């Protein structure tokens, strides 16, 4: 899933300076699962904002709403009623959701309440880790199911750098060295031969370097 | 290894002649004053066959390795231009390879590069378009196939003697010899190893290297760094990733009186070189006296490596 983190409260307050009526718009997708932008977080942030603005003697009116997903026009549509009543929307979706809202509600400022951080998963509740950088050409077959691009600090494709120490990455003893993990797994899978040949120079066109990407299912384009 | 020279650098010729090679290192200054390099050059001249010019080492901004290498050549010395993958994509890399070669640089060392987290610009975006093995292969393709990575023809191929680093002390240990094999397959000509303090482990690694026959496909120069003090030894032991300083060496430095520690550091370095010379498959040494350039000559002298052959 896409992981997001709530922006610092002060930054959010700044974005809302001079605004009297907003909607705080949650998303029922990834950010609900990672506990940063769902229904519950909408409620918490809204009351924080009300309290802070009341304290300033500058109250703000807030409509709370959570859409099924903000990255899907069908659900974004359902914000129409609310959108017509407010001066701005504070979206608690990921960056994609914020933009889908902005594309649909052209005259309405849509502000991000989250920093969208990475594609990953939860190790346990409230603990999220990065796993994929969406390079567009998955290499996990060669690397024992562990991503060298997202998980090696230097995105090395041909093995560990000279700083790998006791299974940890040179940049931080808290970070596992991806290549140690890859090699351990290749060994246990009896696939060490996949390490010995050189991984060719990567074609980054499938990554963001080829420009913004899209994926079209032709069979749905009637 | 064939009879023809790949670049005809002095380093290549010394190695090819079967003589024990010596390389040194010169870090460019954090400023535009060429005089700093010239001064270091005066200290280093004739003390080794060629000298690495680091490329924004530890991700701290310094004068470029190409420019510094040219200044060194003007002093009549031979540089080994280092290049890291951290700061350039394949377009800039190939362009700099052409530029370096056009300026007369004949040796190049291909490195991944220290992560920018260690440097003075941790906010920087890193590149890592290629990794060090792919960089080796890039230079090889450009030199031997006269082609860019795009497959298009190069008019005037860059003649470079291709080097890379190897760190036998990083983990996982069992992958370190196979990783060297990968670098050889990619096209590397010579290797400079990480600073060697743990000779036992190094010998273990070299045994694997020799058993795999890799020493016949690449020239291996063992890395030697003298301790300036016990403090430096301790720092290297605890703070430099991938560095292996055994306790007995630390103890030896610690029990030496402060004013004698520098001398003891030199003695250890000389002993290390002597041991390296006895190891099968070692073709030379790479002496890295970090901000202590004046000692390279002394170490080489005491190890009986001077005068350097004239080629
Ligand atoms: S190789 Fe690419 S697609 Fe596969 S996990 Fe890594 S970044 Fe994602
Ligand atoms: S220590 Fe491991 S994870 Fe970190 S940069 Fe080096 S190879 Fe990558």
Image (cartoon, coloured by chain):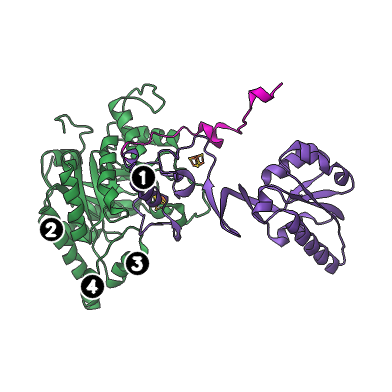
Chain colours: A purple, B green
Indicate the chain on which mark 1 is placed.
A
Write down the residue under mark 2: B275
* Above or below, A216 relative to A75: above
- The Cα–Cα distance between marks 2 and 4, rounded to whole angstroms, is 19 Å
Give the percent coordinates (x, y) of residue B103.
Answer: 32, 35
Write down the residue under mark 4: B253
Label 4 residue SS: helix
Give the percent coordinates (x, y) of residue B203.
Answer: 17, 55
Give the percent coordinates (x, y) of residue B35.
Answer: 34, 52
Indicate the chain on which mark 2 is placed.
B
Magenta-highlighted stretch: main secondary structure? loop
Q: Residues within 10 Å of mark 2 (few under 14, many from 20)?
A: few
- The Cα–Cα distance between marks 1 and 2, rounded to whole angstroms, is 39 Å
The residue lying toward the viewer, choosing from A75 and B112, is: A75
Write down the residue under mark 3: B238
Q: In which quarter of the image is residue B194?
A: bottom left
Residue in the image at 82% along x and 66% along y: A51
- The Cα–Cα distance between marks 3 and 4, rounded to whole angstroms, is 15 Å
The numbered disc on residue A189 is 1
Give the percent coordinates (x, y) of residue B56.
Answer: 40, 50
Q: Are marks 1 and 4 on the same chain?
A: no
Q: How many labels does the image show?
A: 4
* Above or below, B237 relative to B117: below
Q: Are marks 2 and 4 on the same chain?
A: yes
The magenta region covers: A196-222
Along the polypeptide, which appears first: circle 3 or circle 4?
3
Label 3 residue SS: helix
Which of discs 1 and 4 lies nearer the camera? The answer is 1
């Amino acid at each position: 899933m896409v992981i997001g983190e709530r922006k610092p409260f002060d930054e959010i307050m700044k974005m809302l300076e001079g605004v009297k009526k907003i909607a705080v718009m949650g998303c029922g997708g990834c950010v609900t699962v990672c506990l940063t932008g769902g229904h519950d977080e909408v409620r918490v942030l809204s009351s924080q904002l009300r309290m802070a603005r009341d304290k300033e003697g500058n109250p703000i009116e807030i409509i709370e709403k959570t859409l099924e997903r903000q990255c899907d026009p069908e659900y974004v549509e359902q914000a129409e009623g609310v959108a017509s009543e407010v001066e701005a929307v504070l979206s608690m979706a990921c960056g994609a959701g914020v933009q889908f809202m902005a594309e649909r509600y052209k005259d309405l400022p849509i502000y991000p309440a989250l920093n969208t951080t990475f594609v990953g998963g939860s190790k346990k509740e409230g603990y999220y880790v990065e796993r994929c950088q969406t390079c567009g050409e998955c290499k996990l077959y060669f690397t024992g199911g562990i991503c060298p691009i997202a998980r090696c600090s230097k995105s090395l494709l041909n093995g560990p750098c000279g700083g790998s120490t006791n299974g940890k990455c040179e940049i931080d003893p808290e970070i596992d060295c991806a290549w140690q993990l890859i090699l351990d797994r290749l060994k246990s899978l009896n696939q060490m031969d996949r390490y010995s040949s050189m991984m060719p120079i990567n074609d980054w066109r499938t990554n963001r370097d080829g420009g913004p990407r899209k994926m079209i299912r032709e069979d749905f384009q009637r | 290894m064939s009879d023809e020279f790949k670049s005809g650098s002095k380093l290549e010729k010394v190695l090819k002649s079967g003589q024990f090679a010596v390389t040194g290192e010169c870090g460019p200054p954090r400023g535009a004053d060429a005089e700093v390099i010239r001064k270091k050059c005066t200290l280093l001249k004739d003390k080794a066959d060629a000298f690495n010019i680091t490329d924004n080492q530890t991700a701290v901004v310094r004068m470029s390795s190409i420019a510094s290498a040219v200044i060194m050549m003007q002093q009549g010395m031979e540089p080994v231009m280092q290049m890291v993958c951290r700061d350039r994509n394949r377009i800039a890399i190939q362009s700099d390879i052409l530029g370096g070669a056009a300026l007369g640089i004949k040796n190049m060392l291909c490195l991944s590069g220290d992560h920018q987290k260690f440097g003075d610009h941790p906010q920087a975006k890193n590149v890592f378009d290629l990794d060090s093995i792919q960089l080796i292969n890039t230079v090889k393709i450009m030199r031997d196939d006269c082609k860019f990575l795009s497959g298009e023809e190069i008019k005037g191929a860059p003649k470079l003697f291709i080097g890379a680093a190897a760190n036998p002390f990083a983990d996982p240990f069992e992958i370190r010899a196979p990783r060297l094999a990968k670098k050889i397959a990619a096209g590397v000509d010579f290797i400079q190893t990480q600073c060697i303090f743990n000779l036992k482990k190094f010998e273990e690694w070299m045994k694997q290297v020799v058993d795999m026959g890799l020493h016949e496909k690449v020239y291996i120069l063992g890395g030697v760094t003298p301790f300036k003090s016990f403090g430096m030894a301790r720092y290297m032991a605890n703070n430099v990733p991938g560095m292996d300083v055994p306790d007995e060496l630390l103890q030896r430095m610690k029990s030496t009186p402060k004013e004698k520690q520098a001398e003891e550091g030199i003695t250890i370095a000389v002993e290390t070189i002597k041991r390296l010379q006895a190891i099968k498959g070692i073709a030379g040494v790479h002496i890295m006296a970090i901000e202590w350039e004046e000692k390279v000559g002394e170490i080489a002298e005491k190890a009986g490596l001077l005068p350097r052959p004239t080629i």
